[in-house]
Amino acid sequence: MKELIYLDNNATTRVDEEVINEMLPFFSEKYGNPSSMYPFALESKIPMEKAREQVAKFLNAARADEIVFTSCGTESDNMAILGILKAAPEKKHIITSAVEHQAIHTLVYRLEKEGYRVSKITVDEEGNLNLRQLREEICDDTALISIMWANNETGVLFPVKEIAEIAAEKEIPFHTDAVQAAGKVEIDVQKVGVDLLSISGHKIHATKGIGALYIKRGTRLRPLLIGGHQERARRAGTENVPGIIGLGKACELAGKFIDDEVHRVSRLRDKLEAGILEKISDTLVVGTRKLRTPNTTNIIFKYVEGEAILLMMADKGICASSGSACTSGSPEPSHVLSAMNVPLSVAHSAIRFSLSRFNTEAEIDYVIEQLPPIIERLREMSPLTPR
Amino acid sequence: MWQYSDKVFEYFRNPKNLGEIENPDGRGEVGSDACGDLMQLTIKVDPKTKVITDAKFKTFGCASAIASASVLTELIIGKTIDEAMKITNEDIIKVLGGLPNAKIHCSVMGKEALEAAVNDYLGIEQKKFEHEEGKVICNCFGVTDKAIEKAIREHGITTVEEVTKYTKAGGACQSCHLDIQEIIDKIRLEGKK
């Protein structure tokens, strides 16, 4: 097997052929600006609104105009948090979790420097959220709660419905970063009762450069990008029409494939995980195996460093990722694993495998076969390996 | 993905002098698994000529850490202790055909492993790494906010580039530049009060 075996779908995904086909006419045929005043503009405007409905349906939003298109998940997250804070300038307290994606993690770090007080709800060793602490941290000064739905590194799912109930009781806006949950678990914004929810196109087989923010009707929010009246003046800037069309289609497909994700993909993930744990000694899974996304497993290979594993796997055509220092561009180990009290000595040895509907059983068998000699070789090189 | 040179990949895939010398004359271990890298160097030294006759390494770390350690062993074998001590991290980088900015610390670690092994051989007690006070701002070179503040005040620094010049902070991966700028801003505001 020489082709690429892509097990890094939490980083980005392959764009679905159906998504590409849907997008193609909007580059050189129907390229009008949706805001222009001639029928040609409607040829992009009407499909754009159809895409909005597709996204709304996928999230079970009550109305399509609760969906605002953005450029990415990070923008959606920034728009939600900064937009809420600007709309309630008297409040200076933010509640989030200790394991958020950088889009939230680094943003609140900056806000802290600007004078905001930030409470980061802790997680236990399995990555489960401390709900009691969440209740205790809420105060009159709390402007918003932003807690992710699914963790990007471990796949651990948070109890968003319970968080939403706690937030609603205290009338505090609740935003969730659902970038890693979309397409993997059922998302129903009404059932959960969330006020704001971020998704990203390229994580669900649409293109990079497109995201969306669900804003429940009535939520007080100031815009981040200011300029034209696009997106009902909530997000200025000419719309990324092809990206939006693609996101709409990707959402429709994600809804269609959700059962496949839950059953087939999770079975492949379980097979991969069991195979690795059985064939390679001194390995362990990070995070609870009960409540997590069906496609993700994060495995520690003791005594060897993540980047070295990734590069050796790459020689065999296998793509995965690590939260370790060397790959993320920052020498600090993953804040997610640190928050879970994973000892630093093994946090650098964690590899995340994330599958998609495009993965096959043959690929998983191949990875299970190729990994043991790679780990063995690197353990030979490591001074940490017990002799 | 780091843009490693072919040489780095070559040494990563087929490292030279991998292993550990039994009963070595000098042993150095630097870095720590907590910061993601650990390098172990063992050397054999001819007691008469002071020539390093053999060197082996083991590394827990990324491709460039493994490659740097391997290059180091090649550079020191056949050299006298004095000659070997003149080897710098830049010599390692040169053999590797360059290293990405954020990986320069791997070559620095090679140099430190050599110093530790030679000190062990000479019977000099390894200098305990003293933690400077303050919070580490530049992770690549381990520079704290206190050290940066001190440099800014002493040299009247107004730009991030100058901070890098005086303290090395921000000289590699550059992800701390915003933090350094904030320290500069803070001190400038103090001056205005």
Image: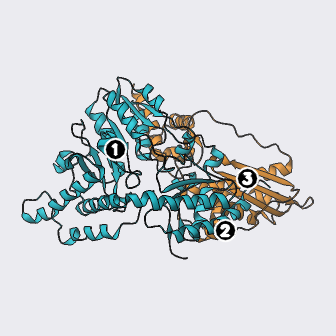
Q: Identify the residue at horizontal 58%, vertical 42% (top origin).
A: B143
Circle 3 packing at 10 Å, graded few (<14), some (14-19), many (20+), is some
Do the residues at discs 1 and 2 belong to one chain?
no
How far is mark 2 from mark 3, CA to CA? 20 Å
Chain letter behind tag 3: A
Point out the image quarter for the C terminus of chain A. Answer: bottom right
- The residue at the far top in this view is A140
Left or right, A346 with respect to A163, comes to: right
Chain A shade in the render? cyan
Chain letter behind tag 2: B
Q: Amino acid at mark 3?
A: Leu
Chain that is orange in the image: B
Instruction: Name the residue tied to disc 3.
Output: A384
Do the residues at discs 1 and 3 belong to one chain?
yes
* Above-or-below relation of B97 to A254: below
Do the residues at discs 2 and 3 belong to one chain?
no
Instruction: Name the residue tied to disc 1.
Output: A78
Which residue occupies the foreground of this view, A217 or B25?
A217
Q: Is residue B5 at least partly visible in the picture?
A: no
Report the disc number at residue A171.
Answer: none
Instruction: Name the residue tied to disc 2.
Output: B11
Q: Secondary structure at mark 1?
A: helix
Left or right, A231 with respect to A253, comes to: left
